[in-house]
Image (spheres, grey):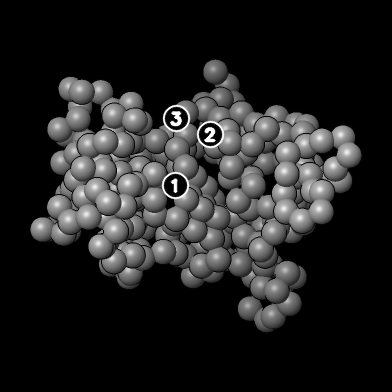
Amino acid sequence: MGIDDVDAIRITDLSIEYYVKGKGLRKSKSEMRGIKAIDGVNLNIERGEIVALLGPNGAGKTTLLRAIGGDLRPKSGKIETFGRVFTLRGSNPGIIPHLTARENVKLLAGAYGVRLENLQKFEQEVEDFCELGEAYDRNYSSLSSGMAGRVGFGFTTSLEPEILLMDETLGVGDEMFRKKAEGKAIEFMNKGETIVISTHSLGLVKSMCSRGVVLNEGRVVFDGNGPDSVKYYLEEIVNVGS
C-alpha cells in the first residue's frame, strides 16, 4: 500500500471557513462574510506519532481536530485518515450526568458499536482504568473532575482507536488522572497508534510528544520536535524567552 503503510493522517491544501453575519458564527450563506479558520494547511502525520498542536486561542487547533475527526467539511483541500478515528474533547464523550459511571459505560458502549460478545471485557477494562472503587456506582455528576476525567478517557481509549484526537484532555482533572492518561497515551504510541492533541501544556509537549505543530491564524508556522516547537511558540508567538 506504499505511503498508506506509513501515514495515519494526510492533509493537503486544507482550508476551512466560518461565516459571520453580525455577532456569532453561522452557517454559510452568500451574504455572509467568510473568515478562514484554516488556511492552506499541508500536514502528514505518521503512525505511532504523538503530535501536539500549539498556538494561541483562535489559531485553528480545535477546528483542525474537528476537521480530521470528520465534524467539519473543508472549503477546499483534502483530509485522508488511515484507521479508526475517535475524538475526546475535555473528559466527556457524551456521558449523562444523572447516571452512574457504570451505567454510562454500558449505555455508551452500545452507542459506539461495542459488540455484545466483547461488552463484558470492555466494561471491565474501563472500570479497571478508572480505579474509582465505590464511586464508580455514584452518579457521574457527583464525581470530582479527576474522577470524571478517568471515566471519559478510559471509555474512549478502550474503544481501541487507531487515531485518537484529544482537545486539551491531558490538561484536565487531577494529577493522578493526568499521569494515568499520559501512561495510556504512551501505550498507544508503543503499539503504533497515533495521537494528535491540542494543548496549552508546554511541559507535556516537551516530555511526551514526539512532534509539535504550531498554528497561527489558521496556518502552520512551525513543525518540529516537541522541545523545538515549544521554543518557537514561546519566542515567536508569545514573545517571551524560553
For discs 3 and 1, the disc positioned in front in the rendered view: 1
Q: Is residue 161 left or right of residue 105?
A: right
Whichever of labels 3 and 2 marks the residue nearer the N terminus, that label is 2
Picture residue at 16% right of the left edge, 59% below the top: 135
Q: Is residue 177 left or right of residue 32?
A: left
User: In the rendered image, which residue does mark 2 sit on?
Assistant: 8
Q: Is residue 38 left or right of residue 167?
A: right
Q: Is residue 231 above or below residue 116?
A: below
- The single residue placed furthest to the right in the displayed view is 31
Q: Which SS class for mark 2?
A: strand
Please identify the quadrant where the C terminus is shown: bottom right
Please identify the quadrant where the N terminus is shown: top right
Picture residue at 25% right of the left edge, 41% below the top: 105
Q: CA distance from mark 1 to mark 2?
A: 18 Å
Judge by depth and name the residue closer to the eye, 104 or 153. Answer: 104
Residue 233, quarter of picture: bottom right
Please indicate, yes or no, whether residue 70 appears anywhere in the rendered image.
yes
Q: CA distance from mark 3 to mark 1?
A: 13 Å
User: In the rendered image, which residue does mark 1 sit on?
Assistant: 88
User: In the rendered image, which residue does mark 3 sit on?
Assistant: 84
Question: Neighbour class for label 3 at 10 Å: few (<14), some, many (≥20)?
Answer: few
Question: Neighbour class for label 1 at 10 Å: few (<14), some, many (≥20)?
Answer: many
Identify the amino acid type marked 2: Ala
Judge by depth and name the residue closer to the eye, 35 or 33. Answer: 33
Q: Is residue 71 above or below residue 173?
A: above
Identify the amino acid type marked 3: Arg
